[in-house]
Image (cartoon, helix red, strand yellow):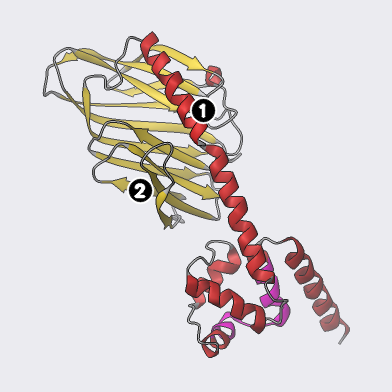
Amino acid sequence: MPHATQHADVATAELDSALRGGPFHVALRAAIAARGLPLQRVQHHLSRHGVKVGVTSLSYWQQGARRPQRPESLRAVRALEEILQLPEESLIRLLAETDERSADRRSAVRSYRALIETSGVLERLLAELGAPREGGLHTLGHHERVRIGARRELAERESHHIVRARRDGVDRFVAVHHGDPGSAPDRMAVHALENCRVGRVRRHHDTGVLAAELLFDTRLLAGDTFLFRYAVEDGTAGVSREYVHGTDTPGGQYALQVCFDAGALPVRCHRFAQHSAAAPRGGCQELALSGRHRSVHLVEPRMRSGYVGIAWDWE
């Protein structure tokens, strides 16, 4: 059977290559294919090793949609090395390397130093616009929709605000946009979409920060509520890997939706929270990508001071 022999040789070669260079999910998929085992049989062998893993989880692991993280899942990976007749630590090593690369990418995007530098720049831009940090408005609701384009770039951010005036005479809001590393604020555009118009705009190239006045054409009285909507057209940076929303004043409900282009879908997404720029990230939770709408979202019923966001990994 020359064709069967050729197929086996190709599968073995692909497995050897995947075990050397990874990533984890490619190596796992190649190992399962090389042994010719359906996922149901793999699950059966795992149960004989005293490890319970669902067929759906195994499928996600070999697709790269999820990766083993819990202690029970890591026990399963070690058992898989034996079941699939792989060198000891071969899959565990690739899994660790994947985690390290993901952590390096995430930490490089919004470092403590970058957040502190941005804070100082923002204070200067607000001072130029004569705008106090809190602006005389209390946020009752804030919905952000971030669109990631075909080049995996942060293409656009749309914001819908529901606010209440803290004092008489408030007639504007200063919108702040922080582009990804390498972004060019001078090529960004601000669009007033509802109940506002664009006033003065200030930009800081080195940090990718843009601050824009949104004028209401009415003066609010203390206690008045107001709705307005605007968008920032970006698309000036490289590959985007997360979106972070930060505030130093507690408010109402906050919702963040990240939408991906059909031709550029991430392999996994998760939410996170951070009490301050210096604090470690916590509250991590995996988010399932909606197949029809190609989006993920988070909702904070009551926004606290600090940072919250969504990060994603590319293939």
Question: Judging from the image, what secondary structure is the residue with disc 2 in?
Answer: strand
Q: Position of residue 15 (x, y in %)?
A: 75, 71
Quarter of the image where one finds residue 67: bottom right
Work out whether residue 42 or residue 52 is closer to the camera in this orientation and state it: 52
Question: What residue span does the magenta drawing correspond to?
Answer: 27-43
Quarter of the image where one finds residue 133: top left
Q: Quadrant of the N terminus?
A: bottom right
Q: Position of residue 241 (x, y in %)?
A: 54, 43
Residue 177 in view, yes or no: yes
Q: Is residue 81 magenta?
A: no
Query: Residue lying farthest front?
Result: 278
Q: Is residue 40 magenta?
A: yes
- The disc at residue 234 is 1
Q: Amino acid at mark 1?
A: Asp
Query: Residue lying farthest bottom?
Result: 48
Q: Are marks 2 and 1 in contact (CB under 8 Å)?
A: no
- The disc at residue 298 is 2
The secondary structure making up most of the magenta span is helix
Work out whether residue 122 or residue 156 is closer to the camera in this orientation and state it: 122
Q: In whole angstroms, how far apart are the C-alphas of marks 2 and 1?
A: 22 Å
**Vertical placement of 253 versus 95: above or below?**
above
